[in-house]
Every structure is written in C-alpha cells, then in structure tokens.
Amino acid sequence: SPTDILMTAPMMPIATEALDKAFTIHRLWEQPDQEAYLREVGPRIRGVATSTLYGRTDAKLLDHLPNAEIISSVGVGYDNVDAAEAARRGIVVTNTPGVLDDEVADLTIGLLLATLRKIPQADRYLREGRWPEAPFPLSATLRNRKVGIVGLGRIGKAIARRLSGFDVSLAYHGRTQQDDVAFTYYPTAVGLAEACDVLIVITPGGASTRHLINAEVLRALGPNGVLINVARGSVVDEQALIEALKSGTILSAGLDVYEDEPQVPQELIDLEHVVLLPHIASASVHTRNAMGKLAADNLIAWFQGKGPLTPVPETPYSGRVT
Ligand code: GLV
Ligand code: GLV
C-alpha cells in the first residue's frame, strides 16, 4: 500500500500533484481537530511535507509520528523544523537550497532601491493626488554607499554579484572569513555596521543569530544608515529597530520578514520611512514551483531508496537506516 505522508500546509499544485501520484497524502491543515487526526493517522506516517512559511515541526508534532523517516521542508531557511530533535530521532530533514538564490537576490536589490528612493511612498503620493500640489520630496541615494552583507552564503553572494554592477563598495560579516572573497571581512556585526551605511541581512535564522542586529549595531550603522532584512525576523531586535527608526538613529529600513509573522507591529506600519513586504523574497510562481518540486523530489527519492537530494547539515545522509 502507498506510503503515508503528512502535509502540514498547502503546497504548489506541481508539488501536490507529484506527491499525490506517489503517496497517500494526509492534509493536516484541513482537519478541524488536528490533535485527534494526528492520534489516528500519526503512527502510519513515514514522511512529512512542510514549509518554512507555516507552522513548526518539533518534538510535539514528532511525538505523534513514531515512524517518520524524513521531513521535507519547502524553503531554504528551515528554522521551522527542530533539526537537532529530528537528528536525535534519526529523521532526515531536507530543505530547498539553490533554486531560489537569484529570485531572493533580485527582490533584495528591489527592496534596497525602493527603500532608498522611496518608490512605494512616491507611488502612494501620486495616487493620493498630491503631485499637483508639490513635487515629491527628494530622496536618499545608493551613490557612494558602502554596503555590508550579513551572511555571505549563496544568496548573499548573488546579492553581491548584483551590487557589483552598482558601483558601491562591499564588505561582509559571517561566522568565518572566506578565502575566495575579495571584500573586507568584519568578525563582528558591530564592526561591519561601523564601516558601512547600508546593512543587508541574509543570514540563517535560529538561536545562533537571534537579535544579531541589536541596538548597538543600529547605533553603529548611524543616521545615514539603511537596514534591509530579507533573512528572518528573529535576526533583528524588532523593538530596537522601531526605536532606532523613531529616534533617527538610522535613516530607514526595508523589511521582508518580522519576528511574529504574519503579525507586523503597528508601530512599524505607522512609520513613513520603512518599506514593508509580506515575506515575498522567493514568491514568484516560477521559483515557488521550483521549490515545491525539489521538496517533492526529496520525498520521492527517499522512498525510492535513493537517499535525500538536499539534506540539511544537522542530518547528513550516511546511508539508508531503514
Ligand atoms: C511550495 O510548495 C510552497 O509552499 O510555496
Ligand atoms: C524563505 O524565507 C525561505 O527560507 O525559503
């Protein structure tokens, strides 16, 4: 009989169709009483299809799934999965790296320019009929900027490649200096912020980067400083950011992610000098299809005995265990 898979949230049709063909899919989000449903089907479940944008796969859920072998998560970030707990239970975790780097990098450049040049604010100004009254106020600029990238992984490098066409100078911070990178390395986020007037945050979320961007880093960024966060809301101390924006400690911010998504603090919404996006960096049809397909392919490959395609570092694949 077909293998039972628990799907925790809706996936793209291309992924759902592939999974429906290969497996018996149990759709958790459709269940009015999820606890009762998990008690009933949980013991049969051998794989989980989930997404970084919805819910958490942790010990509480895994306790219902004693026969789970693999958790396939849509998204490059997988802070929605307790990977250490999965590793302890011998469960492989996969994410969808690589297929979204260019999409996220494109959006990051768009958000940076939108924030500096106040593109959404200018659009609102025109629609509100204010142009005939007075020209839109002059904006800040990307000219002569020094841009610091926090997290120079695959996406960070794709952002750097794009920025190299904008005639700005680049620097970066990450856990370790990379030998093959020519930009200046700063071992601390504060050091990078002191040297730069734009910070682009694209480091993984989770405990090790929580509030890496705090009040001290924002002070170091300074009154001409612009913060762009396309990583995870948890990386930035949101309350410190709100204070820094209100007090003029930094100039402006462009955000795609928040600490308590999809809730966004009213204090941010009330500020005119921030650009706020609803976590859309990878959200094109093209790229979400590629992510969904890779997540489905990980499950299909695993149950064909071929191993996972893209396991996360916490659960390296070292031969099939079952
Ligand atoms: C893809 O399957 C998604 O979750 O967007
Ligand atoms: C989206 O935020 C992702 O991690 O893919």
Image: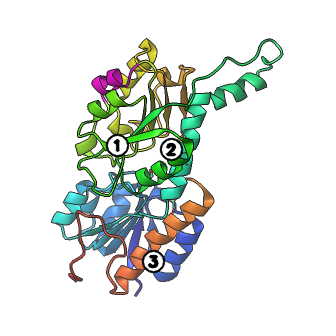
Q: State whether residue 56 is above or below residue 190.
A: below
Q: Secondary structure at mark 2?
A: loop
Q: Residue at x 44, y 19 (%)?
A: 245
Question: Which circle's residue, 1 or 2, is located before the other in the chain?
Answer: 1
Q: Tag 1: residue type?
A: Tyr
Query: Nearer the observer, disc 3 or disc 2?
Result: 2
Residue 272, image x and y in percent?
Answer: 57, 20
Q: Which mark is residue 289?
A: none
Which residue occupies the extreme right position in the image?
132
User: Does ligand 2 reach within 8 Å of label 2's beta carbon?
Assistant: yes
Question: Which circle's residue, 3 or 1, is located before the other in the chain?
Answer: 3
Q: Which mark is residue 279?
A: 2
Say left or right for 220 vs 263: left
Q: State whether residue 321 is above or below residue 206.
A: below
Q: Secondary structure at mark 3?
A: strand
Q: Secondary structure at mark 1?
A: strand
Q: Which sits in the foreground, 285 or 130?
A: 130
Q: How far apart are labels 1 and 2 at the CA level? A: 23 Å
Q: Which residue is mark 1?
A: 172
